Image (cartoon, rainbow, N blue to C red):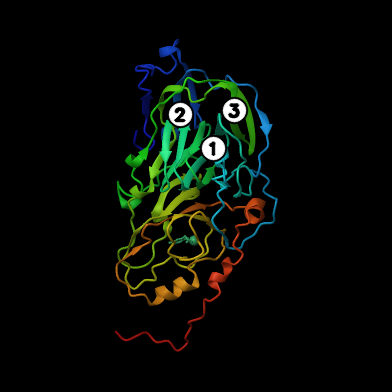
Amino acid sequence: MRGFGNEFSSEDPRCPGSLPEGQNSPQVCPYGLYAEQLSGSAFTCPRPANKRSWLYRILPSVKHKPFTLVPCGDLTENWDEVEPDPNQMRWLPFTVPKSTDKKVDFVAVSLAFPLYITFTELTTHLRLKTQNILVLSCFRCFNNSDGDFLIVPQQGEILVTTEFGKMMVEPNEICVIQQGMRFSVDVFGETRGYILEVYGAHFELPDLGPIGANGLANPRDFLYPVAWYEDRKVPTGYTVINKYQGKLFACQQDFSPFNVVAWHGNYAPYKYNLKNFMVINCVAFDHADPSIFTVLTAKSTKPGVAVADFVIFPPRWGVADHTFRPPYYHRNCMSEFMGLIEGHYEAKEEGFLPGGASLHSIMTPHGPDADCFEKNCTAELQPERVAEETMAFMFESSFSMAVTKWGLQTCQKLDKTYHQCWEPLRSHFNPNWKPSKK
Ligand SMILES: O=C(O)Cc1cc(O)ccc1O
Ligand SMILES: [Fe+2]
């Protein structure tokens, strides 16, 4: 089903009429189902921010044995493991761990999602963590009680099974799975990607202002799953893993949680193909700020300030006249975490690789490497394709970030030579310079 934030209604075609008509909580639901509401916003939120769905399921989520704490592996909410570090950071592509299992669930897939980033509003120091989640096995699902996940597959497609239905998500697509939604992930080979977690805000489409009513990520390109259920008894135990207050808890139940026969509402997972992004850019002169490439934004309560923006750098034309076309040198009051899905990034032809990452923290200076600067000062300014067959992205946040011990040491991917890419920058200053006569 399509349309960002729509009010959807979906019934598994095996059970026509399974959505109650005219009310949410009938005395007895069609097909003997249980009604369960999943609230993604306070009951009293104003209508534009109010998010909830009604799920009609074979058994309610509450039928489970008690949750117990399970080991978190490299998942941590200990933000003080290492000292803060304001340096430019870059990581070589993260290792895809080998799995003997062809089909593994999300928690195991964290093997393949080694990079895990959390923004938290719980403390005054808002942080990022970079780590991998632990390895477990099948008949497991995951739900995040703390916040929403934006998943960016980089290598390998993933099949995301959720309480709302199934979604195949390929590299160059993203999916969002919000707080509380149960899901599992199948992979089909070596798989890797990035996850951004936001707390206390859901992603929205950015306002378009003077752009008008259309453009950037268009609402109709956001796809939502249709209801799909399995009536599966699992006497050996189905494990529900719950990330709660930064720790993992597991409980057992004897049936599949993917037992929702019908649902309706506006709180549901979705996916989006980045190739559908309608790029807007400068057609005269100067380099526009990257906010023009915002796909989704999780707003803070300060106007215009995001908890996190998801920004992409898709293939496009560069046409600006008398302009240094690559990104400018800059220092930013926001944190900039970047990843690369495929291809090259215009400001760094080398060293920033698909499946790797970079972090330019608050006020950390950065910009094009020396090579990029020299080339683009003298380049003949023809219209040219920028970044063909490529997709870089940025998680930009108003929060300061802490990198975990895993990110700095354990993963062994931190590129200690990164700063050297700016070392050859030399002074071109000429105090006797005169404007050229036209
Ligand atoms: O640092 C980066 O590469 C991201 C970025 C791109 C751009 O075109 C302008 C500013 C900016 O931070
Ligand atoms: Fe930047």
Q: Secondary structure at mark 1?
A: helix
What crowding class fits label 3: few (fewer than 14 Cα within 10 Å), some (14-19), or many (20 or more)? many
Q: Are marks 3 and 1 in contact (CB under 8 Å)?
A: no
**Residue 9 % position (x, y):** 36, 26
Q: Nearer the viewer, mark 1 or mark 2?
A: 1
- Between residue 221 and residue 133, name the one nearer to us: 133
Looking at this rendering, what residue extends furthest in the front direction?
100
- How far, Cα to Cα, is label 3 from label 1? 12 Å
Position of residue 341 measured from the top left corner of the image (x, y, whole percent)? 45, 53
62, above or below 356, in the image: above
The residues tagged by marks 2 and 3 sit, at their Cα atoms, a distance apart of: 25 Å
The residue that disc 2 covers is 52
Mark sitting earlier along the chain (2/3):
2
* Callout 2: SS: strand
Q: Which image quadrant: the N terminus?
A: top left
**Identity of the amino acid at label 2?**
Arg
- Secondary element under disc 3, as helix, strand or loop, is strand
Mark 1–mark 2 Cα distance, whole angstroms, equals 24 Å
The mark tally for this picture is 3
Q: Quadrant of the C terminus?
A: bottom left
- Image x and y of residue 227, in percent: 40, 26
Numbered badge on residue 239:
3
Q: Circle 1 sits on which residue?
A: 106
Q: Residue furthest bottom?
A: 432
Q: Position of residue 366 (x, y in %)?
A: 52, 65
Please report the residue visible at 54 percent of the width from the left and 45 percent of the height from the top. Answer: 112
Residue positioned 47% across, 31% down in the render: 162
Residue 355 seen in this snapshot = yes
Residue positioned most to the top: 27
